[in-house]
Amino acid sequence: MNDTKAWWIGFFLIVFFILMSELIVVFREYVYSRLGLSRNLVLSLLWILPIISSFVVVFLSKKNRVLKGLSLIFILSFLGPLTHFITGQFGVVIDFSSLSGLKVTFSIYLVLSSLTIGFGTFVGMLVKKGDS
């Protein structure tokens, strides 16, 4: 597999993560309680997807692995808050719904994506190094 395909797989996993997290935000707590789930637990577990996406990019890439894996931080940090902001503009009740809220969600996404994607990149490099 070439590096471009590997990066696009990671990109689409990030997009899937963003769409699923916004869907989870749209549904109220009672939907999850009826299914016997905790909404916060589902949202927390969903943050495993950025780890997997960066791991896949690093593991499948041949050149510039770390750079390609860490580039997903910027994708998630910009698309996540933008999607959250647009969801609020469509009338969905969300936290941090104004332009100042966009700044707050950008900061949150930047920190969390740096941690998760950084971790996935690190693990991908460890596994790839052991594989060589």
Image: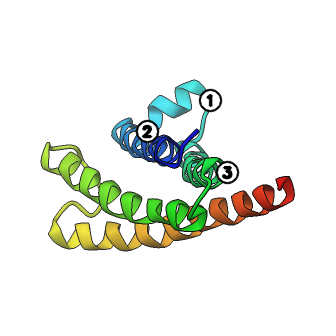
Q: Residues within 10 Å of mark 1 (few under 14, many from 20)?
A: few
Indicate left or right for 76 with 113 as reference: left
- Amino acid bearing label 3: Phe
Q: Position of residue 123 (x, y in %)?
A: 73, 61
Indicate left or right for 51 with 21 as reference: right
- Amino acid bearing label 1: Gly
- Amino acid bearing label 2: Phe
Q: Nearer the viewer, residue 71 or 119?
A: 71
Q: Nearer the viewer, residue 63 or 84?
A: 63
Are the residues flagged by discs 2 and 1 in contact, CB closer than 8 Å? no
Pointer 2: what residue? 16
Q: Tell me the mark number nearer the camera, choosing from 2 and 1.
A: 2
Pointer 1: what residue? 36
Q: Give the residue displayed 58% in from the left and 60% down from the top.
A: 63
Among the two numbered marks 2 and 3 on one chain, the one whose residue lies closer to the N terminus: 2
Q: Quadrant of the C terminus?
A: bottom right
Q: Residues within 10 Å of mark 3 (few under 14, many from 20)?
A: many
Q: Tell me the mark number nearer the camera, choosing from 2 and 3.
A: 3
Q: Give the residue displayed 38% in from the left and 35% down from the top.
A: 27
Q: Position of residue 6 (x, y in %)?
A: 53, 44
Up/down of 69 relative to 8, above or below: below
Pointer 3: what residue? 59
